[in-house]
Amino acid sequence: MPESYSEIIQRLKSGDSSAFKIIADELKDKAFALTVKILNNKEEAEDSLQESFMKLYRAVIDNKFEGRSKLTTYFYSIVYNTALDNYKKLKSKRFSIVSIDVDDSNFEEGDDLMKKYYETEIDKNIYEERHEMSTEKILKENEIENIIKNYIDNIPEQYSLILTMFYINDLSHEEITGILKLPIGTVKNRLFRAKAKLKEIILKKYSEEEILQYV
Amino acid sequence: MKKFNFNINNFYSIFNQMPEQSKNINLDSFIDEKFRKTLSADTSDEFTTELLKRVELQKVFAKEDVKTDKIMKYLIGIVVAFMTLTTLFFGMVLKTGSKGNEVSYLSSAIEKFSDFIEEVSVITMQNLGFAVNIKTGIILLLVIGCIILFSIAERNLSKKMVKVKHHI
């Protein structure tokens, strides 16, 4: 039976730092998805995540984590804030800070989602390169995945961060609200719109029956 | 008698709703699954090893911090005790010296120190325009002692900080 976080915390407090491996193994990839979305660079994202894990370790050892919230929520909050701080330090031009920042008073809900996404024509070469080794079904599935990847890569960070928190970090609407300091209605609305828009894009190209072959 | 109004369209809408709902659920779950797949990212293979190394280092430094804190507390205690004892000692010697009851080896050393202070006092009066007496001399010595002690402590701490940066 896997150990609960409270048991792991007790082990850490008693000086058994090897217990931290369990937390790291369980959360590293999920948290990395969030960090890489913010920093848009894998190396910087790894450094930022290491920093976040060390903050969590110190918080547990120094009794700063009082267990009022779930350990995962507390950790993702650290991950988000550390990545945002690092982003500000790096001042990367690739990513618009205005859109990362939760203060989005000038942002009209959904406008960017419509503007920024352009259905990209799938490179025809993909078909030629893979034709010999892939069946038509695999190609179609790849194409759908490419559409989704392209969509996610192009949607504004207000959406992709919430999507990552919801789908990868398994955070609830309330937990996302707590981390991003956004109204719960906005969080729900963005999730709904992001999903509805993707559905619309996919259904333009494929019939439901075609898609459901892959479910 | 109430007339039973059966509409064939309602019948179809009830039975056709089930597969439609099921389709939507399937499509939703398909999109959810694809979102999960596309948004996921993997850290490098060395990530956990590196992290655990940092945790071990953090543990070592935490132990060292405790040691340094203890040493600093002892040092501060020693300085405070030294300052108190010196002040008391000088106070007592000066008091006994002024009464002229005993002239010990120590009090003669104090006298020599006092003469030196007087000489310094004359020099400072001539050059800087203010005089120095025995009390200010003692205070100055204590201040110099404190500065030396704190600079040693600070050097040790800064060395430690550099060490931490190199390791992490």
Image (cartoon, coloured by chain):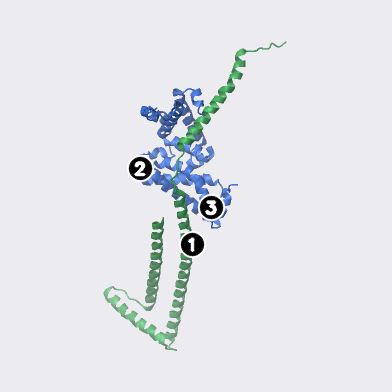
Chain colours: A blue, B green
Amino acid identity at mark 2: Ser
Q: Which residue is mark 1?
A: B63
Q: Give x and y (percent) for residue A161.
A: 45, 38
Residue B55 in sight here: yes
Query: Same chain for the residues at labels 2 and 1, yes or no?
Result: no
- Mark 1 closeness class: few <14, some 14–19, many ≥20 residues within 10 Å: few
Chain of the residue displaying label 1: B
For the N terminus of chain B, the quadrant is top right
Q: Which residue is mark 2?
A: A92
Q: Is residue B10 left or right of residue B40?
A: right
Residue at 39%, 71% (x, y): give it. B143
Residue A100: name its quadrant. Answer: top left
Q: Quadrant of residue B130?
A: bottom left
Residue type pointed to by label 3 = Ala
Quarter of the figure that contains the C terminus of chain B: bottom left
Q: Position of residue A55 (x, y in %)?
A: 47, 51
Q: Earlier in the sequence, mark 3 or mark 2?
A: 3
Give neighbour class at mark 2: few <14, some 14-19, many 20+ (Cα, 10 Å): some
Chain letter of mark 3 equals: A
A210 over A22 or under it: above or below: above
Horizontal and vertical percent position of residue A167: 50, 37
